[in-house]
Structure formats: C-alpha cells, structure tokens
Amino acid sequence: MAEPMGVGVVGCGKISGIYFENMIHRFDNLKVISCCANHFEHAEKAAQKYGIEAVTFDEMLSDERIGLIVNLTPVPSHYEIIKKALLAGKNVFTEKAICLTLDEAKEVQSLAKEKGLYLCSAPETFMGEALQTARRLIDEGKIGEVTGFSVNANRKLDFLTSYFGFLNLPGGGIDLDYGVYYMTALISLLGPVDTVSAFSQNRSPERVNCNPESPHYGEKYASPNIGQIAAMLRTESGVTGTFLIDGESIMSDLAHFYIYGTKGVLDLCDANGFGGTVKITSENPDFSPNVQPVDLGLPYTDNCRGIGPSEEADAIASGRRSRTDCAMAVHVLDIFRTMEKSSEEGKALKVETTCARPEAL
C-alpha cells in the first residue's frame, strides 16, 4: 500500500470539523499534518483538538511532507490560495466554487496542467450513495433512454445570510453556494451542458438581521448576491430540462430532482447530502405508476466530506484522472456565469467550456 498523502488544510471555519474528522479517522490514504487560518488562533484551536500542527500558509507550502493542500476558505480567497499552492508544487483540492470568475478558474486550470499537478474541486456529495445509485440505474438502462430532467430546490436567505455572513460576500449567492450541488450532480449523471436560457434576480438586496445573538440584530444589511435562478438547460447529449433554485422561500430545503426516461422516472433526494432515498417509477400493465425505492447497498451514506481529497490522493497514486478534476468545476462555474449573462441579455446562450462526465465509483 502506498504511503498516505500528506495534507495541509487551509481554513478552520465551521465546515472544517467534518473534514478533519474524516481525513484523520476515516480515509487512511490521507495524513493531515498541519492547518492554517486567516485568524491564527483558529488554527491553533484546531491543531490542539486534532493533534496536528498550526502553521502559516507559507510554512505549509514549504513543508516537503505535504503533497496536497485542502482549501476550505470562502470563495473570494480561492484564486490566490490555489495559485500560490500550485506555484509551490502542491496538488490542490478546493471547496466549491473553484473561483469567482471564469478567467481566474481557467488560469489556475492551465497552471495545474503546466505544472503537472492535480487541481480538483467539487461538492463531494455526487460521490455519495444516493447519486451513485442513480448513476448506476441510468448506466444500466433501468429508466430507458433519458428524455428530460427537473431540478428544484429552495432555501431561506433571510435567515441564512443573517447567521452566515460569508453568504453576503462575492460567490455566496444561491447559485455558487447552493445551486452548485445540483448542477454538479446533474453533470455527473447526464454529462456537460451545451446551452442555457435563464432568469436570475436578487429580490432582496437589503435584508434585516434576524439572528438574536448578533450584535447587529434587527439592523438592515446589504445582501448583494443572486437569490433566485431559473433556467432551461440542454446537455451536450441533447437532453433538455428545467433548473430552479429559489432562495426566497422557507427554511426547510424541499428539493425535487427528477430524471425522466422512456421506461421510468428517477426520483432523487437532496443533492446537498450523501445519502437518502432513490425511487424509480415505472408503469404497470394498466399504466398506473409502480413506485419502488432502490437500495444498491453502495457506501457513503453519511456526511463523507473528505472523500474528495481522498479520491484525489488515490488518483494521484494510481496516475488516473480524478473524478473531481477541476474541468468539471470550471464548467459548472461557466454554466452559472452564462446563466447570468443569459438573464441580462434575454436570450439563450452557448456554454463555452465542457468537461468529461466523471466515472462512476
């Protein structure tokens, strides 16, 4: 067995806990060595809790034990961190979205290729049991030829932006913070997107802080990001469908994700999770629906964040393409930026980039 990949973690915020737990205790091809954070006391706290080292970013990049940087910072920091890590000769896994702009994303993608390094980025949930079950059912022809899809999900940004200030920063909109899970899942199932026709808007550029524990409770604050996005999409394979993410709804995420086929319909669960129930609806002889839950016994049903870095380390060790190769993240970013442009110009637009459909687990 190959030696575990040495890992340095950048960012010790709320999401980092599950990454530390899984990368240290679950995925044995990773060895977390150190962490750093914008506020060094956060790194020291994490280091003490998980038995690792608290260092500066420059110290992390100069550490020859580390082969993989796992970036868990907010999106506005991604470009600088990714570029600096690649220039230091480190492979990178970064949380979604890969960068703020398509130009930045293309630059770091080209830099990784030039340096012969792995740059990976994706919401890892597409590798969980639910979406991998759906992938297997599609690949085995259980729903026949795929004819369409419908993706709908909601959130309550009035609440979330009061509690999580990073959602008011660039890249924190409903598209790149939440819709990215569903778009990545869609591409993992049906392949890249060719054309979009979209409407996007910010219904609430100013909100009122509803967090009673905040010193700014009851005060107005700017919320400049996209809150709703609706689109028609056509994949490169010619399948068309709808995509709606609404951040102006209730707090409970009530996601609906359907893949339609000539022999059946897949009813998927929330793409923001790893597990959940997958149902397939076929027709009885009298044309009444026959709804069956499907359990293929696949792994990764719980919160498996950290599987992305683990899968990347395995890809590096075996010399294969990673399932979270940055080409998919660049394509997802391009789709959302093209949606914005489509909304502004009032017409359907071609998506410039493409990517490979990642291999099933």
Image (spheres, rainbow, N blue to C red):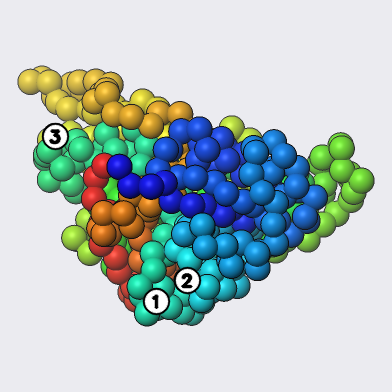
Work out whether residue 320 or residue 144 is closer to the camera in this orientation and state it.
Answer: 320
Q: CA distance from mark 2 to mark 1?
A: 7 Å
Q: Residue furthest right?
A: 215
Which of pointers 2 and 1 lies earlier in the amino acid sequence? 2
Where's residue 288, x and y in %?
18, 21
Secondary structure beneath label 2: loop
On the picture, is 142 further left or further right than 64? Answer: left
Q: Can residue 308 be seen from the camera position used here?
A: no
| Kind of residue sitting beneath label 3 | Lys
Q: Tell me whether circle 2 and circle 1 mark residues in contact (CB < 8 Å).
A: yes
Q: Which numbered circle lies on residue 115?
A: 1
Work out whether residue 115 or residue 188 is closer to the camera in this orientation and state it.
Answer: 115
| Kind of residue sitting beneath label 2 | Gly
Which of pointers 1 and 3 lies earlier in the amino acid sequence? 1
Where's residue 246, x and y in %?
55, 48
Within the image, what quadrant is residue 284 found in?
top left
Q: CA distance from mark 1 to mark 3?
A: 42 Å
User: Mark 2, mark 3: which one is toward the viewer?
Assistant: 2
Secondary structure beneath label 1: helix
Badge 2: few (under 14), some or many (20 or more) residues near its Cα, within 10 Å? some
Q: CA distance from mark 2 to mark 3?
A: 44 Å
Q: Which residue is rendered at x = 39% and y = 68% of the image?
A: 117
Task: Give the residue pinned by disc 2.
Answer: 89
Q: Tell me whether circle 1 and circle 3 mark residues in contact (CB < 8 Å).
A: no
Instruction: Quadrant for the N terminus, please.
Output: top left
The image shows residue 117, relative to residue 183, as above or below, that is below
Which of pointers 2 and 3 lies earlier in the amino acid sequence? 2
Instruction: Quadrant for the C terminus, please.
Output: top left
Where's residue 298, x and y in %?
29, 29
